Image (tube, grey):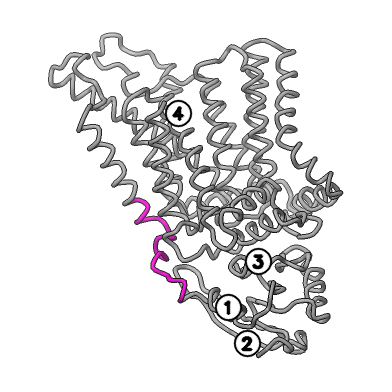
């Protein structure tokens, strides 16, 4: 297992270094979502309590990840980059195990892992790096491996309670990062339940497994209960993270409108992430053909058997894959709302396309061997020695080429810190000699000024949220009227009447690949030098 671990870690390191704007190859990760998580996480580790003291809508585990990352570097994304590499490593190791499950030992799982990594992380839905979806992605991949392994090797025997418990724990982690990907684990446990009933014929086991699964979710929740309980903010946690996300963030749609919205959303994402969805489509067709081919009688005199090109797929195994994908999609987009990075967890299913390609390659290789009169023992598909190194280097070269050709991020790698408005604003604030400057971010999510100035928020609505904007702006303008903040950074020019007592001191803009925006910095007049 040592070689797969080292390979997956190296591929993860290479991929994230190239694909994520959190890496040292980029001037800064300017994504407002990632900066808002950074502000929440860093503030959490400095004594502020999410949901009670600061408003944001993601899960506490995501903030904890960013909080630990801020301990590594409080004003850069290097700590986040480290966690992105670790998350990608776990995801890719799971993908390697899936490929090994279907293709067997040899170099194909190594090649497939490298290509999977390139396709998945260079897709548009990866976006700029550091998304909630990226950090829950390892749970999806690992959960997928556990489910596939069970239905391929364990069924009809009942799944062990230990595996069910671990699956529940993974579901709990997903729930406390961003719960709209939880549909995957609903299907995961649903299929285990039916497998116990139909395969193992263990009715009691089926129901007990449900409670074991829920207990695994509780284990992931206990740290939150302790943390928010000690800080007297369980009510705030439940109100903001659950109530607001469930009842205020989604659109009010009929069932038919909801399915129509999901269709439109998925169509858009397919066009935006063509390679991933091509592999998903190839995998879907291949596994469907493999399933139904079982019911067609094979000529026993054929020299090349069907299983040379098609894997063996059971009905339950096939239904399990369909259920995992279907419920993942349905729950992610059930609210009728989407952003570019929402479908990232779906990218995990691209692995099935690579399974199809790998198996067909093995079959073609065997067919060519038969045509040349080789015996079975002479048709080993795994090269040894220098040939292995050459094959793996070629796979890495192809992966890098995919990343350079597809990732939107590599097109901004040449941007320098000195050219970014963010650092000009930071340097101006530092030149004013204000210790621990009090900032407020308006008309947009966190621009990153909190991050680079190492400033802690002073306002509950430290950024302009899209929910209840009237209330948010009323609170923010109240802070301005009372002079509670030193500097205001806004993505829109403010009406002078609304910011009386403040002066516009800097105005700048950014215009890089697929992104342009204006920024305005206001300073309280008594601080202006």
Q: Earlier in the sequence, mark 1 or mark 3?
A: 1
Q: What element carries label 1?
A: helix
What residue is drawn where x is 69% and y is 11%?
A: 202
Q: In which quarter of the image is residue 213?
A: top right
Q: Which of marks 2 and 4 is nearer the N terminus?
A: 4
Q: Which of marks 1 and 4 is nearer the N terminus?
A: 4
Look at mark 3 in the image and give the residue it sits on. Answer: 445
From this view, report whether residue 15 is shown above or below residue 432. Answer: above
The quarter of the rendered structure image containing the C terminus is bottom right
Q: Tell me where residue 29 appears, x and y as whole percent.
A: 52, 62
Marks 1 and 2 close (CB-CB < 8 Å): no
Single out the mark in the foreground, 3 or 2. Answer: 2
Examine the structure image and report whether residue 245 is included in the region drawn in magenta: no
* Numbered circle sitting on residue 425: 1
Look at mark 2 in the image and give the residue it sits on. Answer: 505
- Give the magenta-colored segment's residue range: 402-418
Q: Is mark 4 on a helix, strand or loop?
A: helix
Marks 3 and 2 close (CB-CB < 8 Å): no
Q: Earlier in the sequence, mark 1 or mark 2?
A: 1
How far apart in space, not on screen, are marks 3 and 2 (Cα)?
A: 21 Å
Marks 2 and 4 close (CB-CB < 8 Å): no
């Amino acid at each position: 297992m040592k070689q797969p671990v080292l390979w997956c870690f190296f591929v993860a390191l290479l991929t994230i270094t190239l694909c994520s704007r959190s890496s040292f190859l980029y001037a800064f990760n300017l994504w407002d979502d990632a900066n808002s998580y950074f502000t929440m996480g860093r503030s959490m580790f400095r004594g502020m309590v999410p949901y009670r003291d600061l408003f944001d809508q993601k899960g506490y585990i995501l903030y904890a990840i960013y909080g630990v990352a801020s301990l590594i570097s409080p004003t850069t994304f290097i700590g986040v980059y480290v966690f992105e590499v670790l998350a990608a490593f776990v995801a890719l190791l799971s993908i390697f195990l899936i490929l090994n499950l279907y293709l067997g030992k040899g170099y194909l799982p190594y090649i497939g892992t490298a290509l999977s990594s390139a396709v998945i992380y260079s897709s548009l839905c990866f976006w700029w790096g550091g998304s909630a979806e990226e950090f829950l992605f390892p749970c999806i991949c690992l959960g997928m491996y556990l489910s596939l392994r069970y239905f391929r090797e364990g069924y009809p025997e009942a799944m062990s309670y230990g595996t069910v418990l671990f699956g529940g724990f993974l579901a709990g982690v997903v729930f406390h990062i961003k719960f709209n990907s939880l549909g995957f684990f609903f299907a995961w446990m649903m299929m285990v339940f039916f497998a116990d009933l139909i395969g193992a014929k263990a009715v009691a086991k089926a129901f007990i497994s449900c409670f074991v699964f829920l207990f695994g979710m509780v284990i992931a929740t206990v740290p939150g209960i302790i943390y928010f309980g000690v800080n007297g903010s369980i009510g705030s946690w439940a109100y903001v993270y659950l109530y607001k996300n469930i009842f205020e963030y989604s659109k009010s749609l009929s069932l038919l409108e909801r399915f129509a919205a999901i269709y439109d959303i998925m169509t858009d994402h397919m066009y935006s992430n063509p390679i991933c969805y091509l592999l998903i489509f190839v995998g879907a067709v291949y596994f469907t053909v493999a399933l139904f081919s079982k019911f067609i009688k094979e000529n026993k005199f054929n020299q090349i058997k069907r299983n040379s090109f098609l894997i063996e797929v059971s009905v339950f195994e096939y239904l399990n894959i369909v259920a995992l994908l279907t419920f993942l999609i349905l729950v992610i987009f059930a609210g009728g709302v989407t952003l570019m990075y929402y479908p990232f967890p779906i990218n995990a299913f691209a692995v099935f396309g690579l399974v199809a390609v790998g198996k067909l390659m093995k079959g073609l290789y065997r067919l060519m061997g038969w045509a040349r009169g080789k015996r079975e023992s002479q048709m080993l598909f795994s090269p040894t020695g220098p040939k292995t190194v050459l094959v793996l280097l070629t796979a890495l070269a192809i992966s890098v080429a995919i990343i350079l050709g597809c990732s939107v991020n590599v097109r901004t790698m040449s941007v320098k810190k000195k050219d970014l408005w963010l650092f000009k604003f930071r340097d101006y604030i530092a030149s004013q000699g204000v210790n621990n400057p009090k900032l407020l971010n308006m008309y947009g999510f966190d621009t990153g000024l909190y991050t680079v100035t190492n400033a802690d928020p002073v306002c509950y609505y430290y950024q302009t949220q899209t929910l209840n904007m009237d209330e948010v702006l009323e609170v923010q303008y109240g802070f301005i009227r009372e002079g509670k903040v030193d500097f205001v950074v806004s993505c829109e020019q403010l009406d002078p009447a609304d910011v009386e007592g403040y002066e516009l001191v800097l105005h700048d803009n950014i215009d890089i690949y697929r992104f342009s925006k204006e920024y305005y910095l206001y300073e309280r007049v008594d601080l202006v030098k």
